[in-house]
Image (tube, rainbow, N blue to C red):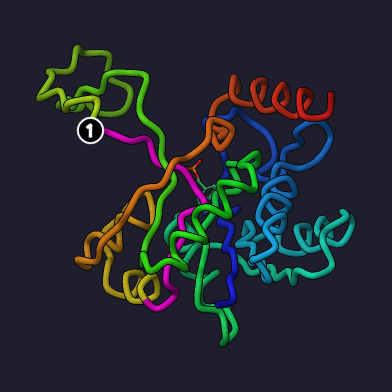
Amino acid sequence: ARTAAVIPAAGRGVRLGPGAPKALRALNGTPMLIHAVRAMAASRAVSLVVVAAPPDGTAEVKALLDSHALPERTDFLVVPGGASRQESVKLGLDALPPGIDIVLVHDAARPLVPVDTVDAVIEAVRDGAVAVVPALPLADTVKEVEPRGEGSFEPEPVVGTPERARLRAVQTPQGFDRDTLLHAHEAVTNAVTDDAGMVEQVGKPVVVVPGHEEAFKVTRPLDLVLAEAVLARRRA
Ligand code: C5P
């Protein structure tokens, strides 16, 4: 079974503050995207990594991949991404060559996922699951609210409190049987926030395996501080 990883990296990263597209921002001197690419290529099972770049930044991303040391046994492709994460993933899937039968989808914004987590996801797909997500239990209790909308400071009424022990915070890479993921991307047109959610919508089973604390998503400025601290600890 040949495995490829698709990395949507076309987001602006508005929540991170002003600056370059998020994936191109440096963590300890190396662009976040390069860390994410290396995290996928670190798995011996991954033979191809497809990056969905900011549409106006494909040349820049190609140049970045060329100028950083990457494993020789892995192939790398850059395609222009789209207006949403979902669209960027689809454009990456469209670029996959025949012969790939397992696909990982990994956020460029999760640069520090350990290779053991990547391998565990692939292993679960090899063992027969059609969709696998790494996830962790939550520290915070979660409330469902009636949202007041962007910019409003009115108190929001609480609708409910799901039992925390039954909730998981989902990470990437999410792993899929290729045909299952392709079908889901063709069938589902409403907006979703993760790929497994599309597979759920087409009625296929999705399973969770243990995620990892270091697979957190770099979203807000504080996450950059944490990411750089994790990298510094790894080098120590
Ligand atoms: O916005 P968020 O942080 O959830 O983005 C998750 C991932 O999706 C990031 O790696 C981001 O670059 C990617 N993305 C994309 N195309 C978009 C929007 C987000 O590839 N249009």
Image vertical order of residue 163 relative to residue 211, above or below: above
Where residue 109 sits: x, y (%)?
A: 58, 42
State the quadrant of the C terminus.
top right
Q: Which residues are magenta?
A: 166-179
Q: Secondary structure at mark 1?
A: helix
Q: Residues within 10 Å of mark 1 (few under 14, many from 20)?
A: few
Name the residue: 58% across, 71% down.
Answer: 3
x, y (%) of residue 192?
32, 53
Going by the image, does 200 lie left or right of 178?
A: left
Position of 87 compared to 129: left or right? right
Quadrant location of residue 43? bottom right
Residue 118 lies, in percent from the top left, at 57, 52
Can you tell which quarter of the image residue 149 is in?
A: top left
Residue drawn at x 75%, y 29% is 231
- Amino acid type indicated by mark 1: Arg
Residue ID at (24%, 25%): 164
**Considering depth in this image, is 216 or 205 the residue closer to the camera?**
205
- Please state, as top left, top right, bottom left or bottom right, where the N terminus lies in the image: bottom right
